[in-house]
Amino acid sequence: MRALTIPAYGETSPLILTELATPEPGPGEVRVRVEAAGVNPVDPFIRAGGFAALATQQPPQVVAGWELAGVVDALGAGVTEWPVGTAVVALIDWIGARSGAHAEQVVLPADHLAARPDAVASTLASTVPLNALTAHQAVAELHLAAGATVLVTGAAGAVGGFAVQFAAGTGARVAALAGPEDEQAVRQLGAEIFVGRTEESAATLRAALPDGVDGIIDAALLGESIIDLIRPGGAFVGLTPPSTPSPRVGVRTHALNVHADGRALATIMDAIARGEVTIREVETYPAAEGAAAYARLAKSGRRTGISLLF
């Protein structure tokens, strides 16, 4: 099978389409023939060696990629719920995985899978699992009470857009921080209060939210500068450990490490198919053009997902 490999860690390391042995599923596992695999900022981080000390994979055949859409093509012992030929999507718990998603065939635990509805194309579906599950788990971590006010920073981004929708779906009042040009789009996702990003966003938020909020999902990584907005009894969810503040008296903080969850992903995919959850459009690249896909991540003004086609 072909896989997009990282032969050595480094920010400018080449990405090489390499022929690797076809993996075989073990007990409780499924092999998926990948049709499309999402590309996210975490993938260049992998290439640079960001998880080198933690990852199961090591050069010269590191395969990045945390999310995929494809078709089941082999079953391990004991797996009965995923017939060969079933269209699926999945998040890979990359750090401990044998391989990332940027490959023609990937083996993963059966409970990581969710069925892909016919109404959602594989290219679109491949950009859902990582960002949607991150947002879903962040909202769940807040433990919101009825009528709570939640601030989502980076609300027009890949995670933030889902977080706005999922928080609003709990009945929370959502305040959103994003670029001024994104106000209409973010309000359509469910934000009641919009705050335009500035060079002094923390001060701008304090002025716009003088009574504070009950929870923050910090997709913009503002961290310590905004934790004082949280009322006693509230919670702060950061998306990276370095950007997550230390706990305060009466304020709980949590650095989220997203994990695979097939059941939650199935619920999200069904909501997308029904038109209840909005997802971004996607730009696609052939697997052989992985370097161009990585380069596209770095360009400003992107409001789309990125997917590699296998």
Image (cartoon, helix red, strand yellow):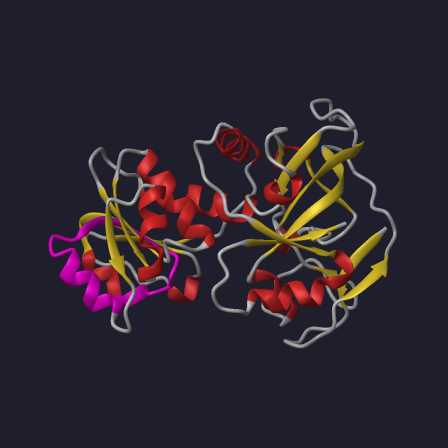
At x 55%, y 37%, the residue is 261
Q: Is residue 269 left or right of residue 27?
A: left
* Residue 270 drawn in magenta: no
At x 53%, y 54%, the residue is 304
| The furthest residue to the left | 211
Residue 284 in the image: above or below residue 224? above
At x 32%, y 64%, the residue is 223
* Residue 214 drawn in magenta: yes
Residue 291 is at least partly visible in this image = yes
Q: Is residue 257 left or right of residue 183?
A: right
Viewer-closest of 270 and 110: 270
At x 60%, y 35%, the residue is 120
| The furthest residue to the top | 80
Q: Is residue 97 left or right of residue 207?
A: right
Number of on-image labels: 0
Viewer-closest of 254 and 219: 219
Q: Which residues are magenta?
A: 201-225
Q: To which quarter of the image does residue 70 belong?
A: top right
Image coordinates of residue 161 in percent, x first then y, are: 41, 48
Image coordinates of residue 134 in percent, x first then y, are: 47, 47
Residue 33 in the image: above or below residue 37? above
Viewer-closest of 46 and 270: 270
Residue 138 is at least partly visible in this image = no
Q: Is residue 22 left or right of residue 4?
A: right
Image coordinates of residue 145 in percent, x first then y, are: 23, 35
Image coordinates of residue 177 in percent, x first then y, are: 30, 57
